[in-house]
Image (cartoon, rainbow, N blue to C red):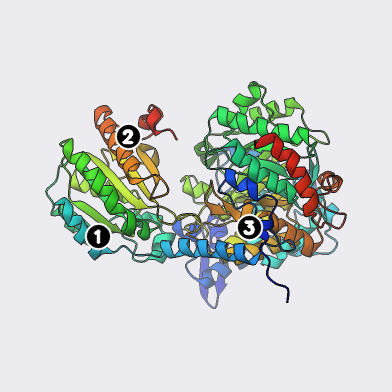
Amino acid sequence: MDKITKPDQNDPLSFLKEFTAARIAIGATGSSIPTKQSLEFKLAHAHARDAVYSAMDIEGLEDALGQFHRPVLQLHSMADSRAQYLQRPDLGRKSNEESLNRLADQITGDDVVIIIADGLSAIAINENVLPLLQLLIPKLSAANLKIAPLCLVEQGRVAIGDNIAHELQSRLSIVLIGERPGLSSADSIGAYLTYQPKPGLKDNSRNCISNIRPGGLDFKSAADKIFYLVQESFRRKLSGVELKDNEGLLVG
Amino acid sequence: MPYQHTVQGKVYRFDNLRILLAKASPFRTGDALAGLSAETYEERVAAQITLADVSIKTFLNEAVIPYEEDDVTRLIIDSHDANAFVLISHLTIGELRDWLLKDETDTLVLKTIENAITPEMAAAVSKIMRNQDLIAVAKKCEVVTRFRNTIGLHGHFSTRLQPNHPTDDPRGIAASLIEGLLYGSGDAVIGTNPATDSPQAVMQILVLVDNLRQQFDIPTQSCVLSHITTTLELINKNAPVDLCFQSIAGTQKANNSFGVSLNLLDEAYQATLSLNRGTVGNNVMYFETGQGSALSANAHHGVDQQTCEARAYAVAKKFNPFLVNSVVGFIGPEYLYDGKQIIRAALEDHFCAKLLGLPMGMDICYTNHAEADQDDMDNLLTLLGVAGCNFIMGIPGSDDIMLNYQSTSFHDALYLRKVLGLKPAPEFERWLIKQGLFDEQGNRSATAAAGLLKDMGNLWIK
């Protein structure tokens, strides 16, 4: 048998890799992708798949969230399982009955509610939500914004925040949710901000800050951007397309 | 008008054609999400048996979305060719399937009924066809289009080179583009999805690709897949627009959600035609479609997602497109859950579009939350190659780092050409041979690639 070669190092296109993260210059064996690169791709996909099926570490997160001295509410959408969550986005947008009862018991009328949901990558939440909150919550507190109980939502989609925030009568919601994993990163958080959240809002009513993770948008920049949007949103009494379009800070 | 069928004493009743079509559709999550699927396996087959007995004339009298409410329905009915229809008008949907599969129903015969079959008829017959039927009939169809080269000839198989970059960095786009060309990709189009819809960014990519094309005299065409209004604006600023792109869907309301109307599409079509940039032909439009888009825009009118998709082909057809493809697995598992559903949907889309006379290609793809992987895509790639699909995507290592999904790689296209003996577009193949990138047998030459690369690299990278 021939010795296995390393075509990537021989690929004359290697120098192009400097300009893009695309999988260029991976070489070829015959017409096909060489073994090493083929398995690298599989590994990246495996990470993404594992992220989709990961679960939030509820106990660990609840313990850790204690440092913010706010009550923590454990909530669940109407999607019972991951398989159902993937097939029925409508169920992932609604709280189940037990959660609704839990929300009904709360004192309401705070300024900001932070809703943490697994989305399509619980790993992202498990690994990255605390360092983000450690930067964000002090900013909100320093601005004298009253923060509602912290909500931890299993099998949740972005719009479930509308329903939760409405129940709690919060003026603004920040949904921190695990984003759909890509091949290069499976641990990104997306932050969605909605002014006067209520059920039935469309995506154009929100502002999104994406790719929050070490190696993507770092926690400090993310916290700054979210805080900036919160302030602007309260000042101008809106969120969504109009807020985004007028602000150069958010471009790029 | 109600339709019904009795299976072992149980009567299945379907109140109208719209419901019958939905219940007869092979299972997919999007129809379940919309509440349109058959409740049981038996009900689905009962619906298929019922549908097989429906005369195809019925489809001209019973619209799934009312004529008065929807301009796509009006387009379908008003452009129907009653003279060509005479050949098949006596058939039921079941008989139409048998007729399509007959040896006598060859490429030429199929060509004569392109305008006689409505999208709903095509969707209906596809629902009672097995995957091999969809392949066998599509294979007989030949839809050829031309701009700077010729796409869709039997025995040929093309690729759209898709050199996307997350920030539209011209060097990043150029890097993927150059690699793709050296792998023989890009005869269908060099088509970049811009990360933003900013006219300046789009213009920059258009100029980059056009310069490269002219410098190396590449017989292909370029496209930046911005919104059609952006493209129109750029045409008015004399941007080098070869093909005009737009995503389209099968209902007026869904098209509105994309920010387009038939009038706007026509305006863009006329504007692009007037540039007169094609050399061997003047098919100038590029459309993308995909099952589930109407439902996701809440604009499906209770029509199943595959029938909605077929209706989008009527919109495409009006503008004599150079390329059309479904972005089949991009929409996600709530519409097409797994490899099986994606493969089925892709074969349906390819079949329906070809039957209606469209130059159909396919973005063979999936997202990371779908139950699918590269093996599923290899299966689909091979099946579509056999079915005579006009083109697929070419993306470095299958991984689109801007749109975050997996499609087909440069390598995948070479695999398919090799195992099925397919060739690129003739003009493009001659260019590849002339540059020494490939030999007459279609084998790659890495040395020539290195030489050409130096020239290209000097142009763009330093």
Q: Nearer the viewer, residue A135 or A57?
A: A135
**Spatial separation of the CA atoms under disc 2 and disc 3:** 39 Å
Give residue A23's position: percent from left, percent from top.
Answer: 60, 53
Q: Are marks 2 and 3 on the same chain?
A: no
Q: Mark 1 or 2, which is nearer the eye?
A: 1
**Spatial separation of the CA atoms under disc 1 and disc 3:** 42 Å
- Residue at 29% over, 64% down: A57
Q: Residues within 10 Å of mark 2 (few under 14, many from 20)?
A: many
| Chain of the residue that carries numbered disc 1 in the rendered image | A
Give residue A212's position: percent from left, percent from top.
Answer: 38, 47
Q: Give the secondary structure at mark 2.
A: loop
Q: Give the secondary structure at mark 1.
A: helix
- Residue at 30% over, 53% down: A129
Q: Nearer the viewer, residue B329 or B295?
A: B329
Q: Find residue A239 and name its label.
A: 2
Residue B416 visible in the displayed image: yes
- Whether B124 is drawn above or below A251: the answer is below
Q: Find residue A205 and name its label.
A: none
Q: Mark 1 or 3, which is nearer the eye?
A: 1
Quarter of the image for residue B388 reads: bottom right
Q: Find residue B346 and name its label.
A: 3
Return the residue at label 1.
A61
- Is there a contact, CB below 8 Å, between mark 2 and mark 3? no
Tell which circle, 1 or 2, labels the residue nearer the N-terminal end: 1
